[in-house]
Image (spheres, rainbow, N blue to C red):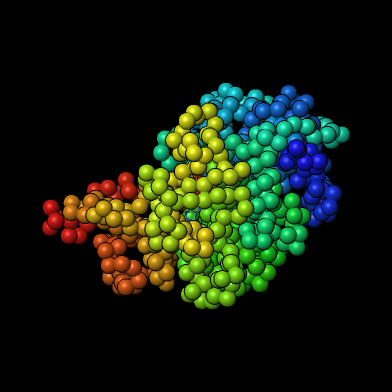
């Protein structure tokens, strides 16, 4: 017997309809790519999204067509998302930080028909356009006055393009399992892989994200998503914020410490989210200027492990609660968030930080487990680590145009490629990416633990641990350090600081100082490049062991 409840497909445009109806005057403020701040609200944003939908339809874009966006977080980019999905077409966010050849590969693989881009990327597109045969038209997210002269095919300023229709239009009707969005993972090995979100998965994911034990977003919040819309669906925030009717502040293309501080302070942001490298820049800026964060209540930090020192500084110096989060493009992307369960609620100081080093527990809608290499369940004792596997309605079941990728197990679990522990309270902690872990004498050393510890040193800005070949131990840890501006420290200082805080055999064999550590397009430490750079590095003592 079926229930007697209404059939109300979970479609993305219902989110912007809800925001426009019940939170219509709530502001969406953007640092525009042209320069000045721009303010709109959800009612206007919905109206203009309808124009996008109407204009795309007029241009012959249909259900299932892919529309690429190469753009920063702005109100126009959001309008484009809702307009594209409102006719059953698919927004395909392209990460502009990828190499041009990767962008070419991704756009061709997705067979995008239209490319919507910010002014910033016109020069890049002009260089690669002749390799993008599927693109019929380039829409530049600006007005006629700022439109550059360009030879890009059928190029038009966005404002002119939507200005040609009247907005008297309705959303299309289709199944909630229809594809809505597409995002390629950076593909550290081989080609990037396309993840294809559905309307249903996007809506469910946003509902999961806003829950009190996740991001706890509400209409009383002013949310600043620093994490870009092209990085793993903006962690859902371009959907979660309108779903709850929160004020939204969009950073445009400026994400340096001073620019982010200006947004936090001017618009009294209460909640923000980004990868640790962004917060590193903000905290360094605050240290220099003496700035305070009186309005900010919560900061979600994920994408890479959040160092203990960062959590401590946010909480103890600035009074901002850190929510450590873990996720993947394949998971829409939220997998777990480290909010305090009642058994931890009264913890303070180091005991609280110990818990916050974990990536947290999953919201309803994410199942999680750890297994050994043969697929046997491992105990949830907070010590034993193994392959982290997940499943749920917002987790990918396949990559776009790739059959039978083994990461999607026949059992229905997705093998994340991460190595983690689970504790008896259901908190997960990542120890490493499976391919980054240092294998020393058959045992594993967590690079994340070493890095976390090293950045706790007051003179260290950033640290990366990598395994370097060793004739006796197979691999040993090498610590690569970037010092804070103007600081001086020796290898001995760093090692003395780490001594006794980590098992003896985990201690790095050597420390090197560099000016910069390479990062991926999504702000993670680029371990592959670092390993390549140090592949012939001779660790002290290695010769003696030969
Ligand atoms: P990409 O692979 O394209 O850079 P993703 O955001 O999908 O982008 O990367 C997901 C991976 O990032 C995870 O599998 C994990 O290795 C890492 N990651 C994400 N959040 C954390 C975290 N809080 N701690 C440690 N690693 C993390």
Tell me if I can see residue 149 in this picture.
no
- Total number of numbered labels? 0
Q: Please state if 483 lies on the left or on the right of 270 as rendered.
A: left
Tell me if I can see residue 194 in this picture.
yes
Q: Residue placed at 55% from the left, 62% from the top?
A: 338
Instruction: Give the image location of residue 62, x and y in percent.
Output: 71, 26
Relative vertical location of residue 376 with respect to residue 323 in this rendering, above or below: above
Relative vertical location of residue 459 with respect to residue 528 in this rendering, above or below: below
Q: Please state if 424 lies on the left or on the right of 496 as rendered.
A: right
Q: Quadrant of the N terminus?
A: top right
Q: Residue placed at 42% from the left, 57% from the top?
A: 379
Instruction: Give the image location of residue 541, x and y in percent.
Output: 17, 60
Q: Residue placed at 51% from the left, 60% from the top?
A: 427
Q: Quadrant of residue 447?
A: bottom left
Instruction: Give the image location of residue 198, x and y in percent.
Output: 65, 37
Q: Residue placed at 68% from the left, 69% from the top?
A: 295
Depth check, front residue: 530 or 489: 530
Q: Please state if 404 lies on the left or on the right of 181 as rendered.
A: left
Q: Quadrant of residue 164?
A: top right
Depth check, front residue: 377 or 294: 377
Instruction: Give the image location of residue 336, x and y in percent.
Output: 55, 55
Q: Please state if 360 lies on the left or on the right of 60 as rendered.
A: left
């Amino acid at each position: 017997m079926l229930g007697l409840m209404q059939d109300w497909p979970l479609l993305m445009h219902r989110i912007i309809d809800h925001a426009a109806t019940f939170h219509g005057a709530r502001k969406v403020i953007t640092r525009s790519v042209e320069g000045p701040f721009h303010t709109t609200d959800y009612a206007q944003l919905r109206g203009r999204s309808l124009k996008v939908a109407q204009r795309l339809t007029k241009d012959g874009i249909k259900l299932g067509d892919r529309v690429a966006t190469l753009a920063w977080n702005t109100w126009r980019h959001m309008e484009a998302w809702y307009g594209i999905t409102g006719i059953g077409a698919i927004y395909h966010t392209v990460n502009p930080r990828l190499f041009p050849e990767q962008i070419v590969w991704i756009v061709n693989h997705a067979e995008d028909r239209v490319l919507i881009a910010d002014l910033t990327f016109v020069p890049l597109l002009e260089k690669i356009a002749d390799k993008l045969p599927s693109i019929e038209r380039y829409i530049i997210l600006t007005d006629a006055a700022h439109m550059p002269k360009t030879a890009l095919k059928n190029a038009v300023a966005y404002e002119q393009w939507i200005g040609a229709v009247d907005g008297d239009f309705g959303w299309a009707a289709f199944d909630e399992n229809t594809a809505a969005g597409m995002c390629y993972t950076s593909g550290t090995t081989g080609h990037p892989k396309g993840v294809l979100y559905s309307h249903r998965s996007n809506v469910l994911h946003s509902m999961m994200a806003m829950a009190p034990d996740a991001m706890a977003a509400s209409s009383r919040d002013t949310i600043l998503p620093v994490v870009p819309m092209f990085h793993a669906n903006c962690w859902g925030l371009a959907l979660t914020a309108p779903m709850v009717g929160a004020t939204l502040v969009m950073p445009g293309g400026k994400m340096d410490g001073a620019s982010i501080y200006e947004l936090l302070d001017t618009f009294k942001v209460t909640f923000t989210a980004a990868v640790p490298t962004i917060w590193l820049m903000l905290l360094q800026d605050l240290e220099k200027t003496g700035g305070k964060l009186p309005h900010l209540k919560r900061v979600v930090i994920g994408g890479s492990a959040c160092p203990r020192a960062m959590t401590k500084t946010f909480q103890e110096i600035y009074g901002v609660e850190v929510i450590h989060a873990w996720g993947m493009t394949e998971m829409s992307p939220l997998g777990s968030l480290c909010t305090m369960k009642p058994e931890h609620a009264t913890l303070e100081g180091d005991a609280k930080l110990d818990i916050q080093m974990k990536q947290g527990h999953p919201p309803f809608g994410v199942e999680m487990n750890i297994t050994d290499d043969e697929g046997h369940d491992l105990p949830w004792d907070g010590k034993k680590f193994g392959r982290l596997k997940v499943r749920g309605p917002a987790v990918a079941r396949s990559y776009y145009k790739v059959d039978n990728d083994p990461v999607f197990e026949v059992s229905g679990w997705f093998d994340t490629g991460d190595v983690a522990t689970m504790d008896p309270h259901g908190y997960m902690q990542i120890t490493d990416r499976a391919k980054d872990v240092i294998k020393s004498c058959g045992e594993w050393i967590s690079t994340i633990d070493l890095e976390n510890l090293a950045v706790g040193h007051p003179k260290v800005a950033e640290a990366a641990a990598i395994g370097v070949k060793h004739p006796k131990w197979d691999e040993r840890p090498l610590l690569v350090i970037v010092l804070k501006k103007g600081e001086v420290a020796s290898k001995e200082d760093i090692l003395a600081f780490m001594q006794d805080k980590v098992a003896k055999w985990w201690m790095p064999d050597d420390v090197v100082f560099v000016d910069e550590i390479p990062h991926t397009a999504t702000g993670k430490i680029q371990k592959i490049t670092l390993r390549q750079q140090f592949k012939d590095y001779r660790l002290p003592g290695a010769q003696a062991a030969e």
